[in-house]
Amino acid sequence: MKSKIFALSKNEDFKTLLNQKKISNKYVSIFFGKLKNKNTNKLNISFVTKKKIGNAVKRNKIKRRLKNITNEAVKKMFLKFNYSYLVIAKPTMLNNEYAIIKETLFKDLERIR
C-alpha cells in the first residue's frame, strides 16, 4: 500500500511537536507525537534543514535523502501513522554515505515503534 506523505503546514503543529518526544542521533533530531485533528491514514512528516548547513543545493540534497529513507521505511512499515514527525537535519549528514545514514535512521525509527 503506497501512502501519501504530507508535510506539516501550521506553525502551531511545529511548536506542538517541538514540545513532545525527541530522539536524536549523529545525523538528525526526530521530534514526534500525536497531533489533534490528524488523519491517521496519511503520514505527517516534515524535513527541516537550517541555513547554516550550506547553500540551497546542499540543503535540498539532504531533504531528498531524508524523503527517500522515509519512503523506504513506510514500505517496510517502520513508522506509526498515528504520530506526526519533525525531522531536523544536522550538518554531519551532508558528508556521510547514504547507506550509513539510512541504517542509523532505521534504528531510530524502530525505537519509536
Image: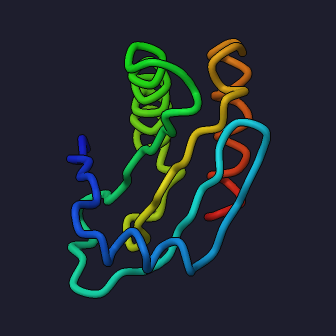
Q: Residue at left 66%, top 67%?
A: 22
Q: Nearer the viewer, residue 99 or 94?
A: 94
The spot of residue 21 in percent (x, y) is 63, 75
Please state the total of marks drawn on the protein image: 0
Point out the image quarter for the N terminus: top left
Q: Is residue 76 above or below residue 15?
A: above
Describe residue 81's horizontal placement relative to residue 88 as left or right: left
The spot of residue 32 in percent (x, y) is 53, 68
Q: Residue at left 38%, top 73%?
A: 82
Q: Is residue 58 above or below residue 33?
A: above
Point out the image quarter for the C terminus: bottom right
The spot of residue 99 in percent (x, y) is 67, 17
- Colour style of the rendered protein structure: rainbow
Q: Nearer the viewer, residue 37 or 55?
A: 55
The spot of residue 36 in percent (x, y) is 29, 87
Q: Nearer the viewer, residue 86 or 81?
A: 86
Describe residue 75's horizontal placement relative to residue 10 as left or right: right
Q: Quadrant of residue 41?
A: bottom left
Q: Nearer the viewer, residue 90 or 76?
A: 90
Q: Residue at left 27%, top 52%?
A: 7
Q: Is residue 35 above or below residue 45?
A: below
Q: Quadrant of residue 30?
A: bottom right
Q: Residue at left 65%, top 52%?
A: 29
Describe residue 98's horizontal placement relative to residue 86 as left or right: right
Point out the residue furthest to the right here: 26
